[in-house]
């Protein structure tokens, strides 16, 4: 899989270099197909504190009048620390490998996010960036309704 990282904001583009970053509108990308493997090699706590845990609710609790899907994301089975120098910088959400949104985080927040998707994709991918241990991702299939 080809992975391109935006040099400005850290966005990860799957399967091809975009013309322009959908997050920050920058044009400078660096190819790094091993970005997730490199992160796993940095930390022995990979599956415990870094892998995004995802819950997919096919009926939206926040906007019930609009046919949407709630994607609830928590970073780590053991909650990732949110300290001044060690925290989750952002969580990006993709539907069928297409970027749909970002939640920015800081040390004053919990390492979690919720995305209310209007799209009806077959899968959702979540990518997070830890300030020390790099990029982590997980993919969940969306149950058919």
Image: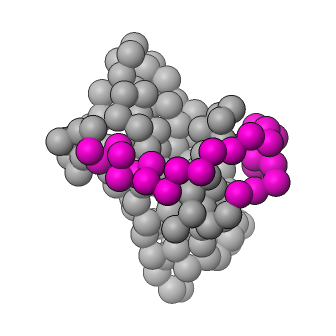
Q: Is residue 96 above or below residue 21?
A: below
Q: Is 11 covered by the magenta stretch?
A: no
Give the quadrant of residue 60: bottom right
- The outermost residue toward the top is 84
Q: Main secondary structure of the magenta part?
A: loop
* Relative horizontal placement of residue 141, taking residue 3 as reference (left or right): left
Tell me the magenta residue range. Answer: 17-41
Q: Nearer the viewer, residue 5 or 91?
A: 5
Farthest residue, direction bottom: 144
Residue at 36% x, 22% y: name it: 86
Q: Position of residue 101 (x, y in %)?
A: 66, 50
Question: Residue 117 vs residue 122: left or right?
Answer: right
Is residue 49 among the parts visible in the rendering?
A: no
The colour scheme is one colour
Relative side of 93 to 79, left or right: right
On the image, the x and y values in percent for residue 133 come to 35, 34
Please give the name of the residue rendered at 57% of the width and 63% of the height, measured from the top-left corner. 2
Please report the residue visible at 35 percent of the width from the left and 52 percent of the height from the top: 37
The front one of 77 and 51 is 51
Residue 105 location, x and y as percent? 51, 30
């Amino acid at each position: 899989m080809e992975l391109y990282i935006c040099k400005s904001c850290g966005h990860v583009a799957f399967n091809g270099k975009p013309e322009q970053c959908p997050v920050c509108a920058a044009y400078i990308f660096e190819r790094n197909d091993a970005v997730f493997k490199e992160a796993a090699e940095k930390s022995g706590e990979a599956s415990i504190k870094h892998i995004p845990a995802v819950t997919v609710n096919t009926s939206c609790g926040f906007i019930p009048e609009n046919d949407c899907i709630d994607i609830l994301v928590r970073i780590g089975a053991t909650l990732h620390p949110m300290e001044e120098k060690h925290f989750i910088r952002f969580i990006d959400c993709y539907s069928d490998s297409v970027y749909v949104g970002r939640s920015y985080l800081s040390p004053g927040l919990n390492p979690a996010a919720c995305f209310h998707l209007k799209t009806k994709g077959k899968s959702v991918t979540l990518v997070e960036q830890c300030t020390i241990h790099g990029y982590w991702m997980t993919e969940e299939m969306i149950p058919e309704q």
